[in-house]
Structures are given as structure tokens and as C-alpha cells.
Image (cartoon, grey):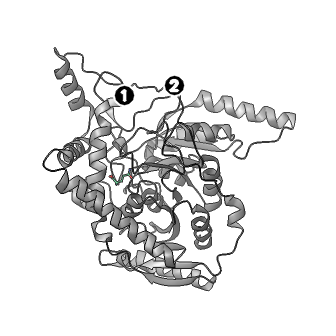
Amino acid sequence: VHYARIAAEDGAINSYLALSRERALAQAEKIDQMVAKGEPLPVLAGVPVGIKDVLTMQGAPATAGSLILKGYRPPYDATAVKRLEAAGAVLLGKLNCDEFAMGSSNENSAYGSVKNPRALDRVPGGSSGGSAAAVAADFAVATLGTDTGGSIRQPAAFCGVVGVLPTYGRVSRYGLIAFASSLDRVGPFAKNVRDAAALLQVLAGHDEMDATSSDRPVADYAAELQKPVEGLRVGVPEEYFGEGLDPEIRAAIEGVLAGLKAAGCVIKPVSLPHTKYAVPTYYVIATAEASSNLSRFDGVRYGLRDAEAKTLAAMFRKTRDAGFGAEVKRRILLGTYALSAGYYDAYYRKAQQVRALLTKDFLAAFHDVDVLVAPVTPTPAFKLGEKTDDPVKMYLEDIYSVAASLAGICGISVPCGETKVGLPIGVQVMGRHFDEATMLRVAQAVE
Ligand code: GLN
């Protein structure tokens, strides 16, 4: 059913870059046989899922939205992918995204932008635009995305679906093509909170292949979702409601808060005083880490290689020049600069210090409240091409998402209404480190 729908309708959306038909059919057959034999079925038996193209699936193309990885077929599965399949999910294929997950609109993909299924002249958000659009268009029941500075939460909000940013270390990054390793996280998109929680249950947990994955026990999310939200303390960070916030989004979030109050939550204003430094801090750290991570794409080890160059140095240069898009080049330059001798202290070290302050803001707030509720984005989905000429304008799109990324806490974007012209609005619920359970409970209450 999903493949038929993709064939008929994805031409207009451009969410899938590759389909993994054989693998999907083999898995479906396996599940069918289990049904025929009356065997107990795993939790995600037969659930069709799509995978963002920065995660590896054995033998399937993994481009990360970049020309430099054209033709690369990794020989192994990402842990997240493997766990979904082991739980019975049917892997449909690879989903479009911004090149190396750098972007907020999916317009940085080398394979064309993705269109927002809710309004075809608008962006789906980014960088996991294909993952959000595929769920919104019903080209999958759920998908995997990654969030480094908003890339799950923001496209979820733009497309009207649920997107989860798990705590840093909760889900293995093994098999994820790295953008900024201290920020990158893998998480699910789904149509509702319950489905997202079911996926997270399968994804979460320690993996010996990722040294940063945590061995803390994983809660039983489905059981936690049964608990009422009555008595929970909900913080409203004043810095997330300043000028620049679209009035319709503000009104929708106020509606959410009124609903939570009616459900018995205690609503408390809180302050996260360093919030205004989050975007510049993020763009120093993320670009610095990217400049280091992307040095592995040199024409020798993966994908594209310039065939004409006479020397090794020329081959590196020509391959990288042809293989990387403009935004990726911009970030390699910015990041290399921030890390270079003489500038390291002024930029990179300073950014790390501010990152610690941002984290402290959250820890202090979570002393008084159980979750934070805020907008995901300052505006609803914008028009294709609207912000492509101005990188700073595009970066400001991340104003409400990057602080949680820097602090390592968990977050979720849940649909909470739409604008007068019918564009989806999302609300963000942020939770303590490793307290996805409480975050999901509140998210379900606002759904
Ligand atoms: N929009 C942010 C960026 O361009 C976030 C991307 C992401 O989370 N992968 O870096």
C-alpha cells in the first residue's frame, strides 16, 4: 500500500531518495509466515518505516543528501535501523534530507528540495524534511530522523506530525553519518505520541558500538503514558515568547497551557537567561565539529572521486569542490576558522563555556518544574526559496530548538493546531536528561 502511494504521489513531494523493496518484501514475508504459524509477533511487526539518508542500511545507498556520497553503499546497518527491523518493522527506503543534515528547510539537498505535503509551495523544514513529509503524506507509518539543532522537532512542527529528540546518549548513533558528534541524535517521527513512544522503546538503550550511548535503564513508556499529568509542574520559559514569535503560534501555545492547567498541571513562569546566546553558540560548535567530521570525505574512502586530477592533493581538492554543496563548504570554512590557532580561544572555547551556562539554565529550571513548554519555531512553514539567500535568516529559524540540543536534554514536537491558512503549528515539550517518560506524558496530554 505504501509503495503504491509513494509511486503515485511522491513525485510531487520528493521525500524518498531510494526504495529498499527487496528487503521490505523479505521482512513482510517473514512476518506473514509468523502470522500463519501463529507465532507471537514482535511489537513493530509489519509497521512500514522510512529511514533518513544519513543512517546506514546495509547495501542501500547512503548519500546524506550529498553528491560526495553518490554511489556509496555501506556494508552495515545503523544500530537504530537494525533495532527497528528486529522489532518487526518493514524498512521501506531512504529519505531525503539537507546535505549532511545541515539546514532548516531541506533546500540544501543535492537531490532537490522536499515539498511540504500540507502546502506544496512551502518547505517541510529540515534537515529531516523527507522524514517528516513521508509521515505527513502517509508514505510511512513512522520514520527515523536526526536532530543536531532542531532537525527532528522543526520539520515535525512544519508538517504537522510528532517528532522526538531523545536525550543525548539515549539512542545509539552507530551508523549515523556524523555532522556534529556532541549534538547529533537519532529519533522517531510518527503520527501520534503513542506510536512515537513505541518506536523510542525499541530504539533506546545502550549499544556497545557507540561509546556515548548510555546504559541507564529504559523506562516502560507505554506504561508511563497511562499515568495522569495532574500535579506535574510545567515551566514556561519567558525567553521563548519574545518578539519575532508569530502571533498565531503564541495563541496556540497559550491554548496548550490552558489545557494543561485544566488537566491539573501547575503552570510556572521560568527564566533561561542565556537563551539569546544559543544560536551563535550552536553555529560555532556545530560547524567546528562538522569541519573535523567531514574531513573523511576525501575521494579515497567513499563515493565520488575526481578521475582527472594528476596529483593526490588535486584529487582531494577537485572531489571536495564538486562533491560538497555551498552550505557544507560554508560550514567547513567557518568551523576550521573557529578551531584554528589564535581563534580557538575566542570562538570555540568561548562557545563551550556558553554551552555550559545554557545547560545550567536548564538544570536550574528543572529544579522547579518537571517539563518546559515552548514554541518549536518562530513561524509556520515558510515558502520554498524564501530564506535561501540569507544564511543568517535561515539560522535564526533554529532559535527555539538549539538550546535543548546544546544542553543534551530531551524534547518533542507535537501538533497543536493550525494557522488561519491551514499550516500546522507545533508545540515543544522539553524534559530532563533521560526523563523521556514525563515529557511523553505531557506531550500526550496536549495532543
Ligand atoms: N538547522 C540546523 C542546522 O542547519 C539544525 C540541523 C540539524 O539539526 N541537523 O545546523
Q: Residue flagged by tag 1: what amino acid is it?
A: Lys
The residue to which callout 2 is attached is 59
- For disc 2, the neighbor class at 10 Å (few under 14, some 14 to 19, many from 20) is few
| Mark nearer the N terminus (2 vs 1) | 2
Out of 190 and 369, give the one closest to the viewer: 369
In the image: residue 262, left or right of residue 125: right
Instruction: Determine if the C-beta at disc 2 is less than 8 A from ligand 1.
Output: no
For the C terminus, give its image quadrant. bottom right
245, above or below 119, in the image: below
Q: Residue flagged by tag 2: what amino acid is it?
A: Gly
In the image: residue 154, left or right of residue 57: left
In the image: residue 441, left or right of residue 160: right
Q: Residue furthest left?
A: 342
Q: Residue furthest right?
A: 38
- Horizontal and vertical percent for residue 216? 60, 53
- Horizontal and vertical percent for residue 347? 20, 55
- Horizontal and vertical percent for residue 288? 26, 47
**In the structure shown, which secondary structural element does the residue marked by tag 2 occupy?**
loop
Q: Residue at x 24, y 46 (%)?
A: 331
**Does any portion of residue 419 appear in the rendered image?**
no
Question: Residue 301 sits in which quadrant?
Answer: top left
**In the structure shown, which secondary structural element does the residue marked by tag 1 occupy?**
loop
For the N terminus, give its image quadrant. top right
**Pointer 2 with pointer 1, Cβ within 8 A:** no
- Horizontal and vertical percent for residue 327? 25, 45
Q: Residue at x 67, y 37 (%)?
A: 86
The residue to which callout 1 is attached is 70
CA–CA distance in space, label 2 to label 1: 13 Å
